Image (cartoon, grey):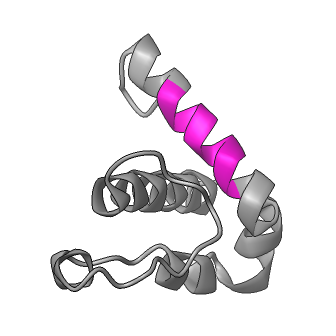
Amino acid sequence: MLNNGYDTSTSKSRLSNGIRVSEYEVDLEFHLRKDTCKELLQKLTYSNRDKTVKRPKKHNIPINGDVYNGTANLEQVVRLYVKFHSKE
């Protein structure tokens, strides 16, 4: 689904992240139908400034480690999901 030219390890990681997003923020398909994931992507926006001032994340997905990088990875997988479905 989301391999998009990535190697097997990266593809598995993307898939795992997509499952985590669905688990904690409601199914991705729901968000896709609702508003093409716009609201979810807003929740997955976390800037360097947010990190610097230690602003809490807006999403419910647990991140072990750096919140900035973890949130960026989750945002990327949602963008890939939207891109994949826009081609259908």
Residue at screen point 30% across, 63% down: 68
Task: Tell me where residue 26 sits by quadrant.
Answer: bottom right
Q: Residue at x 57, y 54 (%)?
A: 81
Q: Nearer the viewer, residue 13 or 4?
A: 13
The image quadrant of residue 17 is top right
How many marks are shown on the rendered structure?
A: 0
> x, y (%) of residue 5?
36, 26
Q: Quadrant of the C terminus?
A: bottom right
Give the image location of residue 59, x and y in percent: 58, 74
Eyeballing the image, is 39 above or below 23? below
What residue lies at 17% left-to-right and 84% top-to-bottom? 49
9 relative to 81 in the view: left or right: left
Q: Residue 78, relative to residue 30: is it above or below? A: above
Q: Is residue 74 visible?
A: yes
Task: Give the main secondary structure of the magenta stretch.
Answer: helix
Residue 2 seen anywhere in this rendered image of the structure: no
Q: Where residue 8 sits: x, y (%)?
A: 45, 13
Front position in the image: 36 or 72? 72
Q: Residue at x 44, y 81 (%)?
A: 56
Answer left or right for 35 relative to 40: right
* Magenta stretch in the rendered image: 13-21
For residue 38, above or below residue 8: below
